[in-house]
Image (tube, coloured by chain):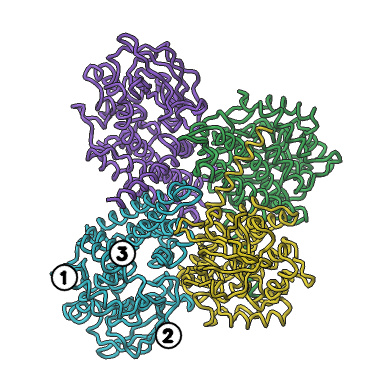
Chain colours: A cyan, B yellow, C purple, D green
Amino acid sequence: MADKVESFVRSKIFTYEKDPRCEDHGPTDDLVQEMRALAREAGVLTPHIKDDSSHFSHLDTALILRKSGLSPLGPLAVNTFAPDEGNMYLLGKCASPEQKKRFLDQLVEGTSRSAFFMTEPADENGAGSDPSMMLTTAKPDGNHWVINGRKTFITGAKGAKVGIIMAKSDDGATMFLVDLPDPAIKIERVLDTIDSSMPGSHSVVNIDNLRVPADQMLGESGEGFKYAQVRLAPARLTHCMRWLGCCDRAQEIASDYACKRQAFGKPLVDHEGVGFMLAENQIDLKQAEMMIDWCASVLDTGDLGTTESSMAKVAVSEALFRIADNCVQVMGGTGLSKDTVVEQVFREVRAFRVYDGPTEVHKWSLAKKIKKAHKIANEG
Amino acid sequence: MADKVESFVRSKIFTYEKDPRCEDHGPTDDLVQEMRALAREAGVLTPHIKDDSSHFSHLDTALILRKSGLSPLGPLAVNTFAPDEGNMYLLGKCASPEQKKRFLDQLVEGTSRSAFFMTEPADENGAGSDPSMMLTTAKPDGNHWVINGRKTFITGAKGAKVGIIMAKSDDGATMFLVDLPDPAIKIERVLDTIDSSMPGSHSVVNIDNLRVPADQMLGESGEGFKYAQVRLAPARLTHCMRWLGCCDRAQEIASDYACKRQAFGKPLVDHEGVGFMLAENQIDLKQAEMMIDWCASVLDTGDLGTTESSMAKVAVSEALFRIADNCVQVMGGTGLSKDTVVEQVFREVRAFRVYDGPTEVHKWSLAKKIKKAHKIANEG
Amino acid sequence: MADKVESFVRSKIFTYEKDPRCEDHGPTDDLVQEMRALAREAGVLTPHIKDDSSHFSHLDTALILRKSGLSPLGPLAVNTFAPDEGNMYLLGKCASPEQKKRFLDQLVEGTSRSAFFMTEPADENGAGSDPSMMLTTAKPDGNHWVINGRKTFITGAKGAKVGIIMAKSDDGATMFLVDLPDPAIKIERVLDTIDSSMPGSHSVVNIDNLRVPADQMLGESGEGFKYAQVRLAPARLTHCMRWLGCCDRAQEIASDYACKRQAFGKPLVDHEGVGFMLAENQIDLKQAEMMIDWCASVLDTGDLGTTESSMAKVAVSEALFRIADNCVQVMGGTGLSKDTVVEQVFREVRAFRVYDGPTEVHKWSLAKKIKKAHKIANEG
Amino acid sequence: MADKVESFVRSKIFTYEKDPRCEDHGPTDDLVQEMRALAREAGVLTPHIKDDSSHFSHLDTALILRKSGLSPLGPLAVNTFAPDEGNMYLLGKCASPEQKKRFLDQLVEGTSRSAFFMTEPADENGAGSDPSMMLTTAKPDGNHWVINGRKTFITGAKGAKVGIIMAKSDDGATMFLVDLPDPAIKIERVLDTIDSSMPGSHSVVNIDNLRVPADQMLGESGEGFKYAQVRLAPARLTHCMRWLGCCDRAQEIASDYACKRQAFGKPLVDHEGVGFMLAENQIDLKQAEMMIDWCASVLDTGDLGTTESSMAKVAVSEALFRIADNCVQVMGGTGLSKDTVVEQVFREVRAFRVYDGPTEVHKWSLAKKIKKAHKIANEG
């Protein structure tokens, strides 16, 4: 399947990278649907989910998603992109049969998009990277829940048909499924950000007295963080997989450039200052691959993989940034221009160092675990 | 003067940073002229050149240009931006009185912009970072010269009124002054690049049988590299000055953010992971300032400052990138968004690590000088 | 077996780390034999070679050697140390049965040590890191060969009983086995170096008309580089394995320190500046482990693993240095003192970044392969 | 004076670097006195203090001490070494005329050495890098004070004739001057550390009912931290000056090596991988010099320079470590051996990153000041 995806992305999708419908706020849904029609035809749509609705193992998924990521457009074309891939995973694990039919099927078929409403604005002393500070509330009202709050950085909210909303009931964090758009969910503004690969970009959203029927609660009241955990590590890891594919591509482009262009009397690649950067990239790519595969294998055992996915997120995102930065530098002015996809990869990977928990939050969490492990070892 | 410039940029220019006329290809000339009218009124237009046409010392210029750089729009507003600042410097040093009157005065008055046509496309085995590979030719034809060639990354070419063109005569590299636009100079395309602060952005330009009267030659035939040297180190250094100002600003914004926002129970700045980044920035800013001032002092002695400006370019551009990267990281999602100017500073400074000679070319040149110094010392 | 080795090193060898026989030029042979007697008794001597003389797979060896490395003395105690481990591997693969009996058996039994005479002094325009510049010659003389030359950085030469000498015959590089000491092989001086874990340290050696019977040639004349290749990648990798074990230990010690000591009102580990260093180490340790295992798996397929072992050497040695450096820093003054083994690990790992090919030589070689692969791909 | 010192160190002291009296615990006092006799004769003993007992400005001192540092032995030879240089500065500022005559004069004349008893062991929940946790007490008893406590990392304690002891009276931290040795001050053990330049090395010291006459109190009771501040920033900075000189030397040696030795067909320096390291060093050396000079100029205004010396300590110590590490790497095996002083410089500078406040403590302190400055700016 990975081979099929690679071949599809290389032959059909690369060509769309200069399509004017790749806008600052991400590719338009028109472009997405055009590419998906091709993917459907080629048998590579939603390639990580099998016909019987089961998922490939995390380890198999790693290769499939990596290949889909060879173009920033690839994951959109074959429906392995964020946040939908993670949302499909969550619904597959936690939704009722009725909920799956209503909300999940359209996502798997690639006919619509979804959004995950969790992060809250830091500027109101809200959650930011710290989910315990969530302010959005869900109050019961007869057979409904009434949700009020404000969310930010909601990827793909604009244009999504399916929403998963996290709010606090009296029992704790709780998730709800909703159809979108909904007049009670207002997109205050679409953020202008450094990255541009996500359709609908990222939005600030106001939720004002949204009424949700009780049967649209995902699982149980107060269990929202538990379900978020189900999604958390795998979704964090699929980001790594896709961006690894993008950096494979950047390295291909930069190597080709360095082998073909001359400077000061010899090919660029023969300058150690350039050749060393490509060599470092080759090592970083290998290490990123192995961190992903290791974490995927842990997830395949049924473990939550919190520690492993924190380690993988830090290692992979920082490695990919070094790679992308080196590729830009190897290519000089061309690396800074949109003539190749390297420039976009650089911007996307910069954002990735923040998204899904900045490096520093993961290190903080790892340090806490080192302390805890020490305590257990010394008391045991 | 530096204080006046700072006060002007803070009070009048910051507010333009979200003006829709700040486009991907740089601010429009309409916006530039609107800001310059304010600068003229405030007595801060072209602040580094005195009324008697002499320049402030390089050391004084360092502070003035740094303050102008507090906004990416500042250098445009007060006319200290690249490539015009460097072009004005070159014309002031090398042009004849007639040439000054015709080409320089309009630039000093800030009523028009200029472009410097030197870099050639690497994809034709052309110059890239290596000026010795220049392919553009100048052939004498009666009292005229006929220029043919192709140039790339010509900053500000679109919309410029004055052009300085480097071409090879039989005597060697030679510079010519031309009025723009000219039908023989065709802008093939304006590059889409990661940076967006330069009006007119960067263009690929085709020069097809451009006829230039002999009196528009700058200085002598074959002396082009000598004049380029005059411009080289100072122009390289003024880039450092302006971008240092931009990073001062980014640090201000990130510090403010870190002191006001809370995460995990305390202000961000109280997290060592965040506070250390700001502390490192403070050190890097100081070091960047001192490298600039040192190199400026060397230039003020009349020295060409080739070594010093290479050292300064490497040290300052790499330091500023660390600073900008830290500022983005400190601010998390907000750092990635265009809600503050930090996101743009990050992109601009990334480009700066390549423009005016990538870091690697300068290190290469420094290593050559270390070898040469060793040889002299051992033979001396 | 790895568990047995770990348990042995922890319970029996740690205690020798402050033995005064750990001298600047490495542990004395007296100490080595005392520890080996314990290892023999515990059934962990030469643990990576099975009773039938076959070796464990490279992948299994990785874990055994890592555990032996938990103390800098461990590899000496259990006979997995360099250069003997690599020499045993080479003789096992390339020596004749008679040669094995005479030279290999004593090494496997741990009763004597060996040395590998390859590197030549750079100060005579000799080989240094560049084996093609070898100046040592082997001339046939009847049924003998006469060897002349000068070698440097010959680890363990002082005190070794077995020598493997690389010299150039008319056919090319050739290896010879010799008993040591030999009056024709003079140790000019034992180098004082930053590391101190190797018994006999590293010597400069002069070979003056050494006569070697023809049956002590290893394999064929002119095939020396081929045999060196057999030894090269595995020996490079076992270095990685052992030093990884040492850094596991350093991390244990530093974590323990950081959890127990207080500064500015809380345990050191609760300072992000400290906790982040430990978290980075945890990630680096994992990545080092995976690079080693990956390369070992490639070697287990029978591949020479030149590229993979270059990648592993660079990645692992640089990662281990960051780890050791962080451990020193976490522990402050205590990290600088010989009160714990961390100080030695730091020095040893610094040396490791140079030994077996400095980082830069491997990057250079990787860049060459990137260029070659590009050429093949474009012509293919 | 700086020229005289440089010339003296180069011509008279370099030759002592391989003297066997350079022991692991530092040069012997015998060697120190032999070198000082030469310095006295050459008129360069205690060169930073003028004949009228006044000090050169901090800025002038920077150059003198840098030149004295060209050899690790230089500061000992000319009496600019730590901790004596700082102790002389402190006594010159804070001691009474009688105290100066008794304790300071012998130090300035270079006939004896001194020690500063401040740091306490971290393993007793003592001070470590955190002076507020000091446990050593001073109790009045008639016209005497009785001091009890335990100190660690007391540089030069063994062999010192003059001691400055910090202890807590009821008024707070207080300093006392004592003659050494004294039976109540027992050197528990001399630490074995990675560095080896300080005579007497660093000791753990037990103070058991030490009786000190009241007139040996330095200044007033409870003012100890104030006096420590007087010494703090200048002493921190003189470390930077001396080690900068050492790294100047390492760069000289490594450049010479790289220009003379060949590898893979050309001089090492022509390999970009090597030449770039030397170029980076050149930049780092310049930046270290400027940070020192800037901080010295601030101290010359009478300012305490706490922020500036923290910035300088972090920037300079980290830069010098990069330089020393690069020099080792450039020289390969030779860099690891004690054949040149580069190996020692590497070890000394590693220690310097911890001594006088580890990098992390200074960043922590700088972050606190950024927060405070923000508060003041926003309230002002």
State if disc 1 and disc 2 touch (CB < 8 Å): no
Q: Could you tell me if residue C136 is visible in this image?
A: yes
Neighbourhood count class around disc 2 (C-alpha, 10 Å): few under 14, some 14–19, many 20 upward: some
Amino acid type shown at disc 3: Gly
The chain to which mark 3 is attached is A
Image-quadrant location for residue B318: bottom right
Residue that numbered label 3 is attached to: A69
Mark 1 to mark 3 CA distance (whole Å): 22 Å
Same subunit: marks 2 and 3:
yes
Residue C84 position, x and y percent, is: 34, 26
Residue D223 position, x and y percent, is: 73, 52
Mark 2 to mark 3 CA distance (whole Å): 31 Å
Q: Residue furthest left?
A: A52
Label 2: element kind: strand
Same subunit: marks 1 and 3:
yes
Q: Residue at x 61, y 44 (%)?
A: B369
Same subunit: marks 2 and 1:
yes
Amino acid type shown at disc 1: Ser
* Quarter of the N terminus of chain A within the rendering: bottom left
Residue that numbered label 2 is attached to: A188
Left or right of B160, for residue A291: left
Left or right of B141, for residue C180: left
Q: Is residue B331 above or below residue D95?
A: below
Neighbourhood count class around disc 3 (C-alpha, 10 Å): few under 14, some 14–19, many 20 upward: many
The chain to which mark 1 is attached is A
The chain to which mark 2 is attached is A
Label 3: element kind: loop
Amino acid type shown at disc 2: Glu
Nearest to the observer: residue B203 or residue C103 = B203
Q: Look at discs 2 and 3 and give the one toward the viewer.
A: 3
